Image (cartoon, rainbow, N blue to C red):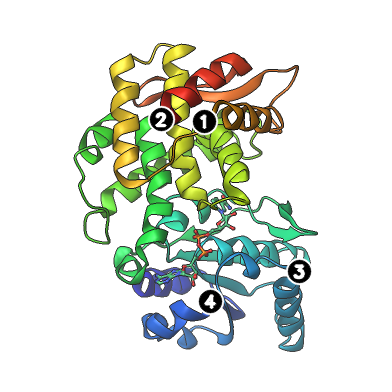
Amino acid sequence: MPRMQLLKWLEKHPCSAIVILADSAVWELYDTLFDGLERYASITLMTIQGGEQAKSLETVSALWKKMLENRIDKEALLLNVGGGSVSDAGGLVAATYKRGIRYINVPTTLLAMVDAATGGKTAINFNGIKNSIGVIALPQEVFISTLFLQSLPGEELLNGFAELLKYALIADSALWRTVRNLTEINGDTVLPKWIEGAVAFKKRVVAQDLHDRGVRRCLNFGHTAGHALEAFFYGRAPLTHGHAVALGMAVEAWLSHFCGSLPRQEAIDIQQFIARFYPFVKLQDSDVQEITALCLQDKKSSFGAINCTLLAQTGHYTVNNSVSSEDMQMALHSVFS
Ligand SMILES: NC(=O)c1ccc[n+]([C@@H]2O[C@H](COP(=O)([O-])OP(=O)(O)OC[C@H]3O[C@@H](n4cnc5c(N)ncnc54)[C@H](O)[C@@H]3O)[C@@H](O)[C@H]2O)c1
């Protein structure tokens, strides 16, 4: 339970104040889980609406202002309670307030549990550009409780499940063999030990490459095609980020077969599993060309080649693979024709 973990942490780490930045919908349901913190330090609470709009200069600026007004000093702790939108914005506030104070994330979405809350990437969206302003600053701790998943809407669960599936495909073939039998994804079928595995893996990767210059790129599996698909469908029938990444993984599984050593049957199995939970429509050849052009605009692409993380086999990845436009088109056709 986050409460017990927090109380234990506070016992060992004195704080001059605790600033809580909470998703208002989450706080309404779970505020009593945080009872007792006031025994350790005075509490300043700020609730915000979760979702992309939370990642704004307005949120960050309102929190800076409130913290200054409440005379919060450098020995304070910022506690982020919510999904990735809250930990991204709150992490940035913690990293910048008085040149940096400590922060702890209590993630309440599956996506934040397996991904966003760990790894220290903080950001807001600015001038219409997602994650354009941010810093890397690691949280002191990430306290996870799957209790929060009970109230999470199905679409949000699927959004996070895509990242859990990514972890299984790149690093945990035993988990892949387990999850491929799932017929339902809900707060009960997603097991805490899977989340623990994903978090431990991400922590290991981040410890080797905090600034995303090498091995951290393994976490991009599915994301090159996924971002292009997300952009392509944006003006048509928008996909959630997780949905786009899931479809991106199906495409990149085929690429792993065409350009690497993934057996054809594995690519088929991955695609069929993804199609069970993440529906998609057939695409025309002109759509495939448009999506390929979007892949070439990816920041990792250069010299006319697309940079992808691929699977050598399930549970094993290779980073920095150069993929041609023709290969990408073939993989897109394999999924969407
Ligand atoms: N920093 C990173 O490494 C990293 C990684 C992946 C994603 N992200 C960022 O994470 C953000 C998305 O975060 P997210 O998907 O966690 O969701 P979110 O924070 O945007 O929240 C999504 C919705 O779920 C609601 N919600 C949250 N917890 C709930 C609960 N327990 N019960 C009921 N409703 C709940 C919120 O109120 C909101 O309406 C994006 O902005 C993305 O850029 C960051």
**Residue at (76% x, 69% y) in the render:** 57
Q: Tag 2: residue type?
A: Ile
Residue for badge 1 = 218
Q: Nearer the viewer, mark 3 or mark 4?
A: 3
Q: Tag 4: residue type?
A: Ala
| SS of the residue under disc 1 | helix
Residue 15 lies, with reference to residue 304, above or below; the image says: below
The x, y position of residue 60, in whole percent, is 72, 71
Residue for badge 3 = 57
Contact (Cβ within 8 Å) of mark 4 with mark 1: no
**Residue at (28% x, 27% y) in the render:** 269
* Measured Cα–Cα span from mark 1 to mark 3: 30 Å
* Measured Cα–Cα span from mark 4 to mark 1: 31 Å
The x, y position of residue 224, in whole percent, is 58, 33
* Measured Cα–Cα span from mark 2 to mark 1: 7 Å
Residue for badge 2 = 170
Ligand 1 within 8 Å of disc 1? The answer is: no
Q: Tag 1: residue type?
A: Cys
